Amino acid sequence: MALAPGDGPFVGMELPQFFGVSVVEVGSPTCESPGTEITGEEADIEGLLRVRASPSPLSKCPRCWLHVVQEAGSVCCRCTGALASAAAAEAEAAAQHLSSLYFEAAKDRLYADAIPSLSRRSVQTVLFHILHSVTRVLAPITVHGSEELFDHYRRHVPNAPESVALLGWPELPAEWRLAEDAPLLRDFSQLAKLRLATNRALEQERRDRRIGSGLEARLTLDPAPGSELARILDTYLDAAGCYNAKAPAALVGLPVIGAGSGSVIDDLTARGLLLRTSEHRHRYPFDWRAKKPVIMRATEQWFCRVSDLTSKALEQLQTVNMVPPS
């Protein structure tokens, strides 16, 4: 199924799953907010609330949605005299950004990523801030719902007040807000538009009963060469699951599952960027037919517009002698 063709040659990029699993996240910036590191426990309230008083490094996706939380919270704090404006800001942040985008993108990390991994701990950090900050902002708008959320929260927090109304407005760190022209914010804006177009195409296929669910579809994206979307969807892996020439020279040709992982660790150690090491079991998506793990990546493909060749193909077909005659 072709989606959003570009203006250039017939170049496409196949993306089997939007917001796919990142193979390695290196050099992610930190968010300097106090007391935000979440220990790697199971995805329950106890795990979310074990907070240590040290900054937590965040990967790209969680940093983008802390920006959403900070932006919506700031609007609500400025709109204390205009309840309708505050409610609208919170509704947009909760429904359009956090619920339909962030939670959908983050749930695979909570289920499949290793407990001490950066990606999973980043998600838990953002979930804690949503629980701790957004609940207080929502209190004047959805009183009973906010109290129910806070009641569950305070049972696990020593010396918590009896009501969310006693907490006051949250102080949202200015570091959460990204500049309007920040590359990270531009990239996620592009991905959000891509996701919307993809879901519309999938929904049309479901209505026409060509597929039963989105998992049955194999999407083909066709960004124009040199466009921002083509840059975002770039990949460092080849068809064999090895690092290609776009990766650092020490990794080229190494398989990402196996020798490549050790080389990445050695490189980080040599540059003093490896904070700590631990052993854990990591689960890749698994192909039960091939009995092998699946690596999700964007791939370059070439396509031919058959509609432009139909008439010529029919003309050539008339010159072919069929045996037996059709």
Image (cartoon, grey):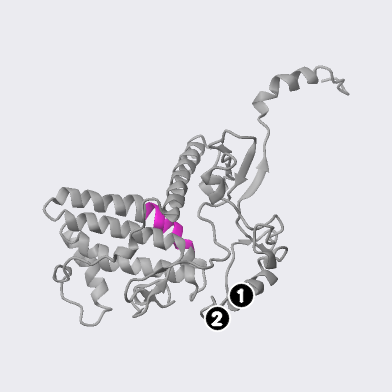
Asked whether disc 2 touches disc 1, contact meaning CB atoms under 8 Å apart, the reply is: yes
Instruction: Using the image, determine if residue 184 lies above or below residue 37.
Output: above
Residue bearing mark 1: 265
Does any portion of residue 129 appear in the rendered image? yes
- Residue plotted at (79% across, 20% down): 316
Q: Amino acid at mark 2?
A: Thr
Residue 185: horizontal and vertical position, in percent? Answer: 41, 53
Q: Amino acid at mark 1?
A: Ile
Asked if residue 102 lies in the magenta stretch, the reply is: yes
Label 2 secondary element: loop
Which residue is nearer to you in this view: 229 or 285? 229
Q: Bounds of the magenta span?
A: 99-108
Residue 191: horizontal and vertical position, in percent? Answer: 47, 49
Which residue is nearer to you in this view: 246 or 107? 246
Instruction: Using the image, determine if residue 256 lies above or below residue 319.
Output: below
Q: In the rendering, which numbered label is found on residue 277? A: 2
- Pointer 1 local density, CA inside 10 Å: few below 14, some 14–19, many at least 20: few
Task: Specify the principal SS of the magenta part.
Answer: helix
